[in-house]
Amino acid sequence: MSLSARTPVLVGAGAVQQRLDDPQQALEPLELMISALRRAADDAGCAQLLERASSIRLPRGFWDYPDPGRAIARRFGAKSARTQVAELGVLQTTLFGVAAEAIAAGDDDVVLITGGEAKYRALRAQLSGTSAPLTAHPGGEADSVLRPARDIWNQIEADFGLLMPVNQYSIMENALRYAERLSIAEHRREVADLWADFSRVAADNPTAWNRDGLSADDIAGSAGGNRMLAFPYTKLHNSQWNVDQAAGLILCSVDAARAAGIPQEKWVFPLAVTESNHMVPLSERREMHRSDGFRLAGEKALDIAGKSIRDIEHLELYSCFPAAVRIQAREMKIPSERRLTLTGGMPFAGGPLNNFVLQAAVRMAAVLRAERRSSGMLTAVSGMLTKQGVSLWSTQPPTVPYRFADVSAEVAAAMPTVEVIPNYDGPAVVASYTVLYDGNTASRGVAVCDLPDGRRTLAATQDAMLAKAMTESEFCGRPVIVAQGIVTSAGY
């Protein structure tokens, strides 16, 4: 296929990181984003792209700027740029999808995508008793705001204290262990080995936050303050969001790239972006260790691009927790010998709240450019593996037109769900569970329980002996007696 003038292409990618102990000297998120976009323009070799931007798109972060894109447009002199903010709960790959789609349709010529956080700066201010305020930027909302359709959890999950991501992902992890018939010890080693490999990648990534190169024993053990947070996850299994990082990406049409004199060796083509926005809270998923969204979004993206997973040389699977990576790999039938990250992942490369996928895109672009005619997959998750996004990229010109596809309807048709009820009394079977900690002590177990009539309920225990037993032997599949949300009897 000859390249259409409207073919979307990534021409500039830049990332910044700061780690200053003095918060007064550290840049706030908006300034980090501006710096990242300047680096992206330098990468493209054309600073004029910044003022030519027809739209500026950002994922919402911890910051409270109402319309940061407008402040960026003023800084660069992009007087006609439209602005867009994707709120929390919107997939980060959605921004790639809508930007490339707008370019292909002729609605945009040059799009800036950026995001950033300065949570390390805020942490240092808190620890030092100083302030690290954000500059006020008065004004209303962005020209366009993308919002999720519903909440990512249900009221019963909230009532049982399962709002923190680590609590819900640990339930997925335990469900996956049980489905694969691994012992607790075997599972602990498998997850630690996976994360140790991510850590080794981060050690070789010059932009990674933690380049210590930790071992599987480091990750599975308790040394160095690596305490348990929610069984089976330690602190090192969690995304590290106390970072100061930002990324900037510049996409444009092939016609605009040629007019700006950007050499083709800089071009990285988005081949396809697919996503599922079908939202089901975790406890309502019949198979908590599965993701029909990733299965179908992955199949659709590869089908659009005319590729198989074996044709994709480079992978960056969204890595907020091990369960997310492990479930994605299984659903998309990625061979077990494949390395699943280019960056080192969110615990080690750094996991800024709603911006990691943009950071990873910068790394992906560099790797693809260094290996001409190669392809890469970059995925995204929103919520508790609630939404799923897949993007495919290549330095090889596409053979078919770019497409942005939503598979939500297909996922809704394929995904088995279950009704979850409160205040149940009677027998049940543990579908999955987690154990929460008070310091280093297992203090409270929370179980998702299957009922004899096919429905579900949630139940908890504050029995310290039972909570400890739940970390030492398999409780998935265990018969229990539940009374008004309390586990009153469990054989152990």
Image (cartoon, rainbow, N blue to C red):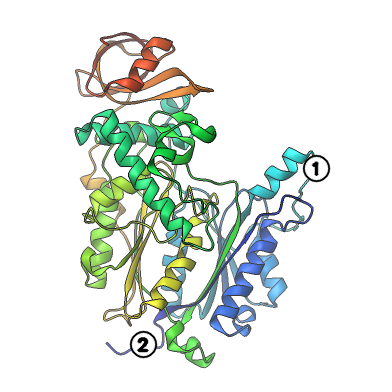
* Quadrant location of the N terminus in the rendered image: bottom left
Task: Please tell me which residue is depicted at 35% across the width and 22% down the height of the picture.
Answer: 471
Label 1 sits on a secondary structure element that is loop
Disc 1 marks which residue?
Answer: 130
State the quadrant of the C terminus. Answer: top left
Going by the image, does 140 lie left or right of 430?
Answer: right
Q: Which residue is mark 2?
A: 4
Residue lying at 30% horizontally and 90% vertically, measured from the top left: 2
Tell me residue 426's x, y (percent): 27, 9
Query: As rendered, which of 308 and 110 lies closer to the eye?
Result: 308
Q: Position of residue 115 (x, y in %)?
A: 57, 60
In this view, the residue in front, 409 or 210, is: 210
Cβ–Cβ under 8 Å for marks 1 and 2:
no
Residue 92 in the figure: left or right of residue 337? right
Expressed as whole percent of the image width and height from the top left, the position of residue 162 reads 45, 29
Image: 388 above or below 425: below
Question: What type is the residue that disc 2 sits on?
Answer: Ser
Q: Nearer the viewer, residue 361 or 202?
A: 202
Callout 2: SS? loop
Q: Earlier in the sequence, mark 1 or mark 2?
A: 2
